[in-house]
Amino acid sequence: MPRIVPQDSDRLVEVFKKVGYVFSRISGDHIVMVKQGSPRPLVIPRKKNVPVFVILNNLRLAGISRDEYLKLLQA
């Protein structure tokens, strides 16, 4: 199974847009995305290399599996 590696914040925004999240606002150095029916917003730090633990936490909040994330990342 391929490893999840740090990604650019712009690429992560595109991945989460594919599953229905929309840009809400920028709060300091963080991008906030929301989805209708989701209990919490996703917060993505504006960095070239977003740490893996942040990616995994956002995947958990969004209800996206590791395999689904990797497919969305390649598409």
Image (cartoon, rainbow, N blue to C red):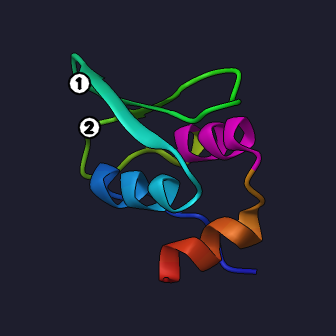
Q: Is residue 16 above or below residue 35?
A: below
Q: Indicate left or right for 28 with 63 as reference.
A: left
Segment tinted magenta in the rendering: 54-63
Residue 67's spot in the image, x, y percent? 75, 72
Residue visible at 70% across and 30% down in the picture: 37
Circle 1 residues within 10 Å: few <14, some 14–19, many ≥20 = few
Residue visible at 56% across and 73% down in the picture: 72
Task: List the residue tagged with mark 1.
Answer: 29
Main SS class of the magenta portion in the image: helix
Could you say whether the residue bearing mark 1 is in a helix, strand or loop? loop
User: How far separated are the C-alphas under marks 2 and 1?
Assistant: 6 Å
Q: Which mark is residue 46?
A: 2
Could you say whether the residue bearing mark 2 is in a helix, strand or loop? loop
Q: Is residue 59 above or below residue 30?
A: below
Q: What's under tag 1, amino acid-wise? A: Asp
Quadrant of the rendered image containing residue 24: top left
Looking at the image, tell me whether mark 2 or mark 1 is earlier in sequence order.
1
Q: Are marks 2 and 1 in contact (CB under 8 Å)?
A: yes
Residue 31's spot in the image, x, y percent? 32, 31
Q: Indicate left or right for 29 with 22 as reference.
A: left
Residue visible at 62% across and 79% down in the picture: 71
Q: Is residue 23 above or below residue 8?
A: above
Whether residue 5 appears in magenta in the rendering, the answer is no
Residue visible at 77% across and 46% down in the picture: 63
Q: Where does the N terminus fall, quadrant-wise? A: bottom right
Whether residue 58 appears in magenta in the rendering, the answer is yes
Q: Indicate left or right for 46 with 53 as reference.
A: left
Q: What's under tag 2, amino acid-wise? A: Arg
Residue 9's spot in the image, x, y percent? 32, 49
